[in-house]
Image: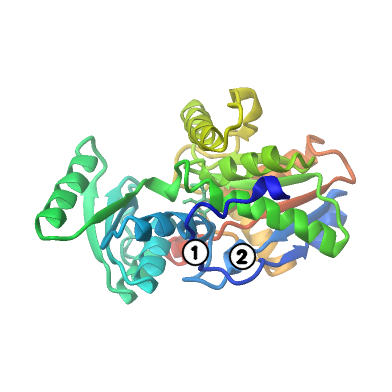
Amino acid sequence: MENMDLSKYPKLKLLNQATEVQYMAQLSGQLGVHLYIKRDDLNGVGFGGNKVRKLEYLLGDAQQQKATHILTLGAIQSNHARLTAVTARMKGFDVELFLKESVAIDTDAYQQNGNIALNKIVDVKMHRIPNDNAMMNKVKARMDQIIKDGGKPYFIPVGGSNALGNFGYVDCYSELLKQQEDLQLKFDYVVAASGSGGTHGGLIIGQILSGADMRVKAYNVQPEHDELVDHTMAICNETLQWLGRSPISKDEINLNSSYSGTAYGFPEDIHLETLQLLAKQEGVFLDPVYTAKAFTGLVQDIKKGIFPLGSSIVFVHTGGTPGLFAYNNLY
Ligand SMILES: Cc1ncc(COP(=O)(O)O)c(C=O)c1O
């Protein structure tokens, strides 16, 4: 796996060990496949989740650039914002979160619990902003002010999904290849939720660099399909260019957007049924915004025969479980 050596990119280590791969025995029996879940939701940092792997690289870059303040953008219940808050605090940065009012849910739980409660615990500045075209101007104005005050801001885009953030899930792909050997398993597919493309993008690049035959598939958590394909391709191609590799085309991005429901942040009955099923059968809690949608897609596609009977599938649980408490009115 020497092709996957990313050691020239600065990395702030946040994770000490591989996340566990668990076999879903009952569900596998019912569906006629071998279904595993990789527990990135339990990675041990800040309530867990996929963003920690990306932040190892993004904060590594911020530190190399001698940044003092980390700024990022996300929905009110953004897991990315929460994990940026926690990890950047751990590494001694000041943190400012720009939380956009993009999901029209006005319950107290959504507005104050879940990720918001965790952000408060680590004591970071939260700016609530309308979801409009002026969002980035607000971030830029704040960055200018930080510079005037003698600091150095570092901006992380939505979801930490850029060419550098991709490396987090290149690491995950290579971790899975190693776990296959250690556990004497052979995964035919790795499956994950996609929101801003960096998790999917990293896995795609992991497959390209390794030349392995573990195929990558993602499920979109919002109905906007073309935008996400375009963004995933753009960030992948930037990373591939850094690595001296040929660019990919849209055909190499296996994204299914048909189980997303009508909008980001709004789980529907079928997603909640899947969430309850997995909790009751296997003791694994999905989150209502990302993994419940993606896992629903996976289960439905297995039932439709899109994943052949007998195949071995590993679903990456990308976290988001604090969101369960923001949506407590749904169960
Ligand atoms: C829990 C969870 N799963 C999946 C995703 C999607 O990851 P990405 O933004 O890299 O597509 C996110 C992104 O915010 C997330 O919070």
> Is residue 4 visible to us here?
yes
- Please state which of residues 138 and 109 is positioned toward the viewer in this rendering: 138
Establish if 214 lies above or below 283.
above
Establish if 136 lies above or below 68.
above
Q: Residue furthest front?
A: 8
Give how far apart the Cα atoms at labels 2 and 1 are.
Answer: 9 Å
Q: Residue at x 52, y 42 (%)?
A: 221
Report the amino acid beneath label 1.
Answer: Leu
> Is residue 270 visible to us here?
no
Q: Residue furthest left?
A: 148
Determine whether the residue tagged by mark 2 lies in a helix, strand or loop. loop
Which class describes the residues within 10 Å of circle 1: few (<14), some (14-19), or many (20+)?
Answer: many
Residue 64 pos. (x, y %)? 37, 58
Answer yes or no: do the residues labelled 2 and 1 have beta carbons within 8 Å? yes
Which class describes the residues within 10 Å of circle 2: few (<14), some (14-19), or many (20+)?
Answer: many
Quarter of the image for residue 23 reads bottom right
Mark 2 or 1 closer to N-term? 2
In the figure, is residue 31 to the left or right of 289? Answer: right
State the residue position of label 1: 324
Residue 113 pos. (x, y %)? 36, 68
Report the amino acid beneath label 2.
Answer: Phe
Q: Residue at x 55, y 53 (%)?
A: 168
State the residue position of label 2: 285
Residue 243 pos. (x, y %)? 56, 38
- Please state which of residues 244 and 26 is positioned toward the viewer in this rendering: 244
Quarter of the image for residue 36 reads bottom right
Mark 2 near ligand 1 (CB under 8 Å)? no
